[in-house]
Image: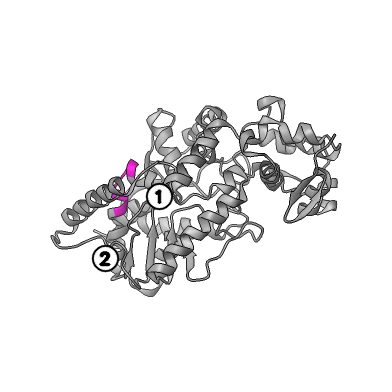
Amino acid sequence: MKRTLEIGGVSGLLTGLVEQKLGHKSLQTCLGCSACSNVCPVSGRAGTDPCMLLQLILEDRQEEALNTPWMWYCSHCASCFSVCPMSIDIPSVVHLLKSFSSVDMLPLPVQQEIEKWVATGNSCSMYPDQYLGLVAKAQDILRKRTGLKDITIPIDKKRARLLLLIDPAVLKARPSVLADYATVFHLTGESWTLPSSPFGTSDLSLITGREELGELWLQRIEGLASNLGVDKVILDDCQNRLSPFGPKDGFKKELESALVTSIPFLVFDYLQSGRLKIKKKVRMITTFQQPCSCPDDQFRTLIRALLERLCTEVKEMVVPVENSVCCGGGLLRAGLEEQMEAFDAAKALQMEKVEADAVITFCLTCFLQFIRLKGLGFIRQSVLFFPEILSSALF
């Protein structure tokens, strides 16, 4: 017997709900051409691929679609969407399937990530004392860099203009990144602050399909922004089409008390207004990981323009499809590293073709994944988070 499912207060069988989510015509236009499966990094894992998943839904084979392990191999990179001749939004279909899974159906690593995040507010299980210790380390780096012995990194500063949320995993991997942010804010005379407790900046609802986690995550950000009275929140998350504060209306979230933006947009405003001046270009050939599944060229154009102002030469990655090959970082954030072999191989192959000294990343997920790839020997390029290359151009 098929289960009756519910989404947004509407009940029904899977086929009807998917069609309601995407539009009846959209799903029915699938040609079965397998273009999506040909570019999918995890095509064939668990005996399934994107095209087969759509056929299961169209044939009303509900239980098979809902129980395929393949959905957890999907990183929502949208390579499939970029080549689909009918523009079927397969990543959104997978997200919808995940939302129907009960907690006990989630892979064990995903369950563990949720437990850590709910308990501590981040996926590192980092508590305030360790977090503040890393902030202190970043402050020492900042003082040595600027020569200012009294300069501080503000914590819980009331009515600052900006609230910076930097993921504990980034601080743990490279505390100097916080010093890079602080350097930029110091040179622009920016009023900013950090929260006194670590905050995981990845919206786990996009990985797990559990919308309640997204609502809790949003409430925590709203609470921080409202309590501190800030105007803007700077989030080190990706600006792709599925990101919580990204450009796709179906997933976009908003705060009542503050605007949310990312450091590239903020830096662009600094440069345009003259608040920030580049002292010298970094003598380095760089490439960059553009956001997976970016819906248009706006953000890609922005980040390339920024890098061209910071570096002597910028090269784009060689891509087999419209978008850059996904780094697979979403699986890393979900604790599913054992499922990342195909992403590792695809990214390594792409990076071999790029004659660059360093790869610049613009979100914490890509940053952590590229550090992992570097550590495993998959890539030879140095890995830099955008604030790092920016601060290098300011001195």
Q: Amino acid at mark 1?
A: Asp
Identify the residue under disc 2. Answer: 186
Residues drawn in magenta: 172-178
Left or right placement of residue 4 versus residue 330 in this view: right
Q: Is residue 186 above or below residue 297?
A: below
Identify the residue under disc 1. Answer: 167
Q: Is residue 393 above or below residue 369?
A: below
Q: CA distance from mark 1 to mark 2?
A: 21 Å
Q: Residue 321 at what x, y percent from top left?
A: 63, 42
Membership of 173 in magenta stretch: yes
Most foreground residue, 87 or 277: 87
Task: Inspect this view and state whether residue 355 appears.
Answer: no
Q: What quarter of the picture does the N terminus occupy? A: top right
Q: Amino acid at mark 2?
A: His
Left or right placement of residue 341 versus residue 36 in this view: left
Q: Residue 214 at what x, y percent from top left?
A: 56, 53
